[in-house]
Image (tube, rainbow, N blue to C red):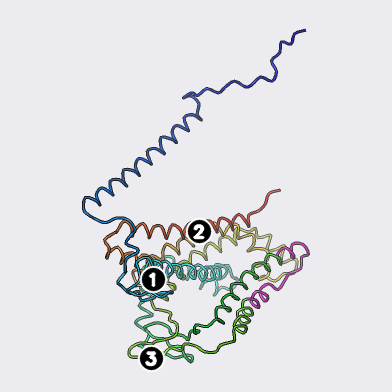
C-alpha cells in the first residue's frame, strides 16, 4: 500500500516581506547605521578640508617635537628638552595619581560617614548628616578654591615653615618630607608591598570559603596588616637595609631635596575626596537600610556584636545595592579631576591645553583629552561591572 503522508519534509522557505517585523527592524538598523556613518564621514572630510584650506597642520606628528616648557609637578623626570608625548604622559600620570588615591580615600570617608549616619549616638549621626548636606550642596569648584586658599594663605612661607617632625616642613610651598635614596632595597620593598596585596586578596578568598564551610572566622585584618607591613620590611632587609634618606633643606626661598606634597595636589585631592565622600555616604546609608531589619535581629540573637553584624551580615548583602551607584561616583571623581586646571595642578587637561596653544592643533589636543578620560571611565566601568557580577546572588 502506497504511503500517502508527507514525512520528513523541510519547512517552507521564509520569504522576505515588508510586513515581517524582523525584516523591517533589520532595514531600519542598516539605514540608521548608514546615516551615522555618512554623518561621521561628512564631519571628518569637512574638517580636513577646512584645515587644509587654512594651512593648519593636522595629525599627531607634533608629539615627537620638543615641548619647550617645564612642568612644576611630575612623577617622572620631565624637562623642556623632552617631547610633547612625554608631557602628555606626565599629565596622564598626574591625573591617575589623583583619581586612584581619590577613589580609595573617598570610599573610606564615605563608608565611615554613611555608617555614622545610622549610628544610635545622636551627636555622631547629626555630625555625619551635617557633613553630607553641606558638602553635597556647595559646588565642587568653590570647594577647590576654598581648600587651595586655606593651604596657600594660612600656611607660613618657607623661611617660617613649621617643623613638626625632624626633616618634615610645612609651608605654603607644600609639605616636604624625607624621601628614600635611589637604592635597590627600596625596589625590593615596593615589590614586597605589591606581593603583600596579592597575598592578602588570596587569603581573603580562602578565609571566606573556610568560613562558609566551617563557620569559623579568620583574623583576616591582622594577617593582611602583617603581610602589608612585614613583606616590604623583609624586602628592605634583604636589600641591605640602607638608612640613607634624602632630607629636605632650605636653600634660598625654597626647599630642595626630599619629596613634596604640593598645595595644588593637596587641595585638589581634599576637594574631590570630601565632596564625593558626601555622595558615597548616602549610597552606603541607603544600601545598608535596604537590607531587611530582620537580618540585624537574627544575627544579634546569635550573640554577635553590632560591629560584627554590620561587617559579616549586613554589609555583604548591602554591597549588591551599593556597587552600581558607587560606580557612578568613581566615574565622577575621575572626570571631576579635570577641574584641576582651576588651581594650577598639571593634569592631562592643563598640559594638553598648553600643548595645543603652542602647536595650534586644537582638534588633536581635545581628542587626546577625550581618549584619556574615555579610557579611564571604561576601565572603571568594566572592573566595577565584573565585581558587581562577582557578588551577585546566584539563582538555583
Q: Residue 205 vs residue 157: left or right?
A: right
The CA span between labels 3 and 1 is 31 Å
| Circle nearer the N terminus (1, 2) | 1
Q: Are marks 3 and 2 in contact (CB under 8 Å)?
A: no
Q: Nearer the viewer, residue 284 or 52?
A: 52
Residue 26 visible? The answer is yes
Q: How many marks?
A: 3
Q: Earlier in the sequence, mark 3 or mark 1?
A: 1
Range of the magenta residues?
Answer: 208-227
Between 184 and 17, the one nearer to me in the picture: 184
Choose mark 1 or mark 2, whichever is in front: 2
Q: Residue at x 51, y 57 (%)?
A: 381
When the figure is inspected, residue 373 is found, relative to residue 232, above or below; the finding is above
Q: Measured from the top left, where is residue 346 in percent x and y? A: 37, 71
Q: Which quadrant, please, contains the N terminus?
A: top right
Name the mark on residue 117: none
Mark 1 crowd level (few <14, some 14–19, many ≥20, 10 Å Cα): some
The x, y position of residue 248, in whole percent, is 43, 88
Q: Which mark is residue 379?
A: 2
Q: Which residue position holds label 1?
A: 143
Q: Residue at x 26, y 61 (%)?
A: 360
Q: Is residue 210 magenta?
A: yes
Tell me the residue that label 3 is attached to: 250
Closer to the eye: label 3 or 1? 3
SS category of the residue bearing label 2: helix
- Where in the figure is residue 216, as x and y percent of width and height? 76, 68
The residue sitting at 64% across, 80% down in the picture is: 230
Q: Earlier in the sequence, mark 3 or mark 2?
A: 3
> Toward which corner of the image does residue 144 lie, by quadrant?
bottom left
Is residue 158 positioned above or below 124 on the image? Answer: below
Q: Secondary structure at mark 1?
A: helix
Amino acid at each position: 500500500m502506497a504511503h500517502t503522508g508527507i514525512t520528513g519534509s523541510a519547512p517552507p522557505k521564509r520569504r522576505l516581506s515588508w510586513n515581517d517585523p524582523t525584516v523591517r527592524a533589520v532595514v531600519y538598523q542598516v539605514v540608521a547605521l548608514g546615516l551615522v556613518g555618512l554623518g561621521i564621514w561628512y564631519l571628518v572630510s569637512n574638517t580636513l578640508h577646512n584645515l587644509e584650506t587654512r594651512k593648519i597642520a593636522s595629525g599627531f606628528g607634533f608629539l615627537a617635537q620638543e615641548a619647550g616648557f617645564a612642568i612644576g609637578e611630575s612623577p617622572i623626570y620631565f624637562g623642556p628638552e623632552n617631547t610633547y608625548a612625554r608631557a602628555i604622559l606626565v599629565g596622564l600620570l598626574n591625573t591617575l595619581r589623583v583619581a586612584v588615591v581619590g577613589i580609595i580615600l573617598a570610599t573610606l570617608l564615605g563608608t565611615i560617614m554613611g555608617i555614622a549616619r545610622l549610628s544610635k549616638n545622636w551627636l555622631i549621626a547629626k555630625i555625619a548628616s551635617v557633613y553630607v548636606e553641606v558638602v553635597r550642596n556647595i559646588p565642587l569648584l568653590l570647594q577647590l578654591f576654598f581648600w587651595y586658599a586655606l593651604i596657600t594663605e594660612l600656611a607660613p612661607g618657607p623661611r617660617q615653615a613649621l617643623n613638626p617632625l625632624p626633616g618634615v616642613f610645612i609651608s605654603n610651598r607644600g609639605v616636604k618630607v624625607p624621601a628614600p635614596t635611589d637604592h635597590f632595597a627600596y625596589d625590593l620593598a615596593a615589590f614586597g608591598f605589591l606581593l603583600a596585596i596579592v597575598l592578602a586578596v588570596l587569603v581573603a578568598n580562602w578565609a571566606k570559603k573556610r568560613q562558609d564551610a566551617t563557620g569559623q572566622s579568620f583574623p583576616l585584618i591582622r594577617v593582611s596588616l602583617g603581610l602589608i607591613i612585614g613583606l616590604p620590611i623583609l624586602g628592605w632587609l634583604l636589600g641591605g637595609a640602607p638608612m640613607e634618606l634624602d632630607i629636605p633643606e632650605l636653600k634660598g626661598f625654597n626647599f630642595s631635596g626630599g619629596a613634596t606634597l604640593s598645595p595644588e595636589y593637596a587641595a585638589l585631592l581634599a576637594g574631590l575626596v570630601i565632596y564625593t565622600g558626601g555622595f558615597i555616604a548616602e549610597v552606603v546609608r541607603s544600601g545598608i537600610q535596604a537590607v531587611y531589619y530582620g537580618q540585624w535581629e537574627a544575627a544579634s540573637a546569635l550573640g554577635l556584636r553590632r560591629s560584627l553584624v554590620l561587617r559579616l551580615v549586613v554589609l555583604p548583602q548591602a554591597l549588591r545595592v551599593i556597587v552600581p551607584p558607587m560606580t557612578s561616583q568613581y566615574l565622577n571623581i575621575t572626570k571631576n579631576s579635570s577641574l584641576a586646571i582651576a588651581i594650577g595642578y598639571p593634569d592631562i587637561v592643563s598640559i594638553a591645553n598648553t600643548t595645543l596653544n603652542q602647536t595650534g592643533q586644537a582638534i588633536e589636543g581635545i581628542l587626546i583629552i577625550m581618549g584619556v578620560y574615555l579610557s579611564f571611565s571604561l576601565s572603571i566601568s568594566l572592573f566595577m561591572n565584573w565585581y558587581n557580577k562577582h557578588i551577585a546572588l546566584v539563582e538555583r
